[in-house]
Each structure stands twice: as C-alpha cells, then as structure tokens.
Image: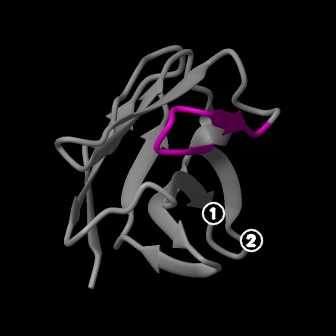
Amino acid sequence: QVQLVESGGGLVQPGGSLKPSCTASGTILSIDVMGWYRQVQGKERELVATITSGGTTNYADSVKGRFTISRDNAKKTMYLQMNSLKPEDTAVYYCNLRRRGANVWGQGTQVTVSS
C-alpha cells in the first residue's frame, strides 16, 4: 500500500519561489507515474505536471517555463520547483501516483501567493 505525504507549501509573495516535496512509503514501481495536481475551492482538480520513473515530464500550459517537476527514485521523493509564482497559482497542491489506472493521493499542501 503506497502512501504519499506532501510538505513545503506556504505563503509567498508574487514573483517568489517554493519547492514542495512528496515522499512515498511502500513499494514504488518503474511503471508508476507521479505528478502534482492543484485545486481551488469550488473548482475541479487540475493537472500541474507529471513525471515518469525515466524522467519524462509533462506540464500544464499555465506553468510551463515556471515550474519544474523532478523525482528521486532512490529516495522515493518527488519535487515541484515553482518559480515566478502568481496569485493565480494559489491552491491546494496534491501529490499523485498512478499505477495501472489506479490513483493514490496525498493529503495536499496549501500554496498561497499574495502580497
């Protein structure tokens, strides 16, 4: 049973940076795709970025060039380097692991971008 725990959210001013992380417990397989999603209250959860065990990445258009997803398979940890943050990036950010169509979610970490 895989469990995911996020950390590293917080309050940052516009233009600032944050680097939340997600650590997994349990066995991680090479087929597992990990990713970050975000959700604003009252809206649907949306994709931010995903990464395969081989390092292939995919980004939402809204974060391309500003966010970088990375993954340390040995540490079972995934990161999201967020630069040039905007108020519209404010959301709860969720870590996700997808295996054969099944999803595992973390509890979420709040990111607030405000002056």
Residue ranking furthest to the front = 30
Q: Quadrant of the N terminus?
A: bottom left
Say whether marks 2 and 1 touch (CB < 8 Å): yes
Estimate the x, y position of residue 101 in percent, counting from the top left: 65, 79
> Nearest the camera: 114 or 49?
49
* Type of amino acid under label 2: Lys
Its colouring scheme is: one colour
Q: On the rendered structure, is 24 left or right of 98?
A: left
Up the image or down, 66 lies above or below 12; here it is above
Residue 58 part of the magenta segment: yes
The x and y percentages for residue 45 are: 68, 68
Q: Is residue 3 left or right of residue 50?
A: left
Name the image quarter holding residue 23.
bottom left
The residue to which callout 1 is attached is: 40
Which label is found at residue 43? Answer: 2
Q: Is residue 95 left or right of residue 55?
A: left
Residue bounds of the magenta highlight: 50-60
Element assignment for label 2? loop
Q: Is residue 88 above or below residue 34?
A: above
What x and y, as percent, mark residue 107? 34, 73
**Can you say whether 17 is above or below 12 in the image?**
above
Count the marks: how many? Answer: 2
Residue shown at the point (63%, 34%) measured from the top left = 57
Mark 1, secondary structure of its residue: loop
Write down the quadrant of residue 67 in the picture. top right
